[in-house]
Image: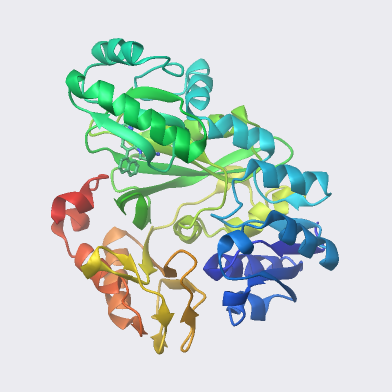
Amino acid sequence: MFKKVLIANRGEIALRIIRACKELGIGTVAVYSEADRDSLHVRFADEEVCIGRGPASESYLHMQRILAAAEITNADAIHPGYGFLAENAEFSEICAHNGFVFIGPTVDNIRKMGDKASARSLMIGHGIPVIPGTESILDSEKQALAMAAGIGYPVMIKASAGGGGKGMRVVHDEKDLPRAFAVASSEAASAFGNPGLYLEKYLIRPRHVEFQVLGDRFGNVVHLGERDCSVQRRHQKLIEESPCPAMTPALRRKMGECAVEVARLIEYVGAGTVEFLLDKDMNFYFMEMNTRIQVEHPVTEMVTGLDLVKEQVAVSGGERFSFDAGKVKFNGHAIECRINAEDPRHDFRPCPGVITSFHPPGGPGIRVDTHIYASYVVPPFYDSLLAKLIAHGRDRSEAIARLRRSLDEFIIIGVPTTIDFHRTIIDDPRFISGDLDIQFLEKRS
Ligand code: MV4
């Protein structure tokens, strides 16, 4: 096992990783920007190294400085968290070449999943269901028109190098396709340096359902159930829960087996997520695989009782799962709200500033993952996540009741937050009945 892990991240996830390492008896190195000097991840790590100024390009994205910090502190491994360098093929490769274990995907994993059109054809070749569409990159507008006529409108044009919502266009009518094709292609070229596009049938109001997977170095892969992440706005998730309200034991078995097969196909080691769209008729389709620990991992921890970050670190260090893969028990229901420093009244604009007063909720079934405290200054350089509030209950209605009363207890003064917005969402009859889809927020406002 590792002696020392460097955490190449900040905020709540840096704290989360430090906690896991401490419980495993592993030393921790925090790296931080000048804007994060007074952050808790710096305070709670065993060692800390300042790696540059506030902007991420001069600190948390600066590969050479992070590697230098790992060298001078003699770390064995680097944990990238989520965002920043977590799915950067070059960084993964450089870590390996410099003798540091990258606690994340291999270059091969990232390349296989990073190009969506080739990931699709890999899945098709192994019988994994994908959304009806093209088998490879479209080579012309004419070919796109012919494919779309075969599939039937509406269709979605997607950038092969994209993901997370960038470089996509919905086309409802063939007369709109030529323009959409041209715009998407030039957008993809400038955003990703790759103009390649493919085309799929556009699904109407599906759910976003993702499976947590975990692989070790001995070829074992397990799934740890699903999360429904349909409540999102402009590709930012706001609420995630497990289990998915629409799930059945038979569907979980089928989708779970698929997720495990996807991870096996790329010999995945560590924590990963296989994303699916689930339509109204309960058909499911592979979308993409995220090769990192995700923001929403705590909901899976609450229902399984496992510590995913400890498992992730341990399997990267060559250990087996700490639990019996055949005996994972799923207990109750968990829901997470992402509390952001954003103003819902002004189009959710980010609001950095001073937290003047802070009181986190507590009591039965409540978990709060946060790096903030009274007098903490939210810097302007990074994402606006302040805290994750996770409520667990014996069933969904108990989890919602706990979420409701804990949102009422949560006090953050000094910057606008999304606390009240969450309070409104969880009182929506459609949310309460579990009738979720990816247009849930668009429809209500
Ligand atoms: C889709 C889709 C409907 N039909 N593909 C958005 C992110 C990227 N991973 C793929 N996305 C979508 N692909 C077809 N064929 C709808 C979306 C989509 C979406 C998916 C998951 C969660 C939120 C979403 C919000 C808008 C669109």
Residue 324 on image: x %, y %: 63, 47
Instruction: State whether residue 285 appears in this view.
Output: no
In the picture, which quadrant includes the N terminus?
A: bottom right
Residue 197 on image: x %, y %: 42, 25
Colour setting: rainbow
Residue 339 on image: x %, y %: 37, 69
Residue located at (54% from left, 70% from top):
11
Front-lying residue, 379 or 235: 379
Total of numbered circles in the picture?
0
* Left/right of residue 14 with respect to residue 439 in the rendered view: right
Quadrant of ligand 1 in image: top left
Residue 119 on image: x %, y %: 52, 26
**Does residue 315 sit above or below 189 in this rendering?**
below
**Does residue 439 sit above or below 65 in this rendering?**
above
Residue located at (40% from left, 86% from top):
359
**Does residue 278 sit above or below 334 in this rendering?**
above
Instruction: State whether residue 246 appears in this view.
Output: yes
**Does residue 284 sit above or below 323 in this rendering?**
above
Front-lying residue, 332 or 420: 420
Residue located at (33% from left, 31% from top):
183
* Left/right of residue 113 with respect to residue 217 in the rendered view: left
Image-quadrant location for residue 345: bottom left
* Left/right of residue 135 with respect to residue 152 in the rendered view: right
In the picture, which quadrant includes the C terminus?
A: bottom left
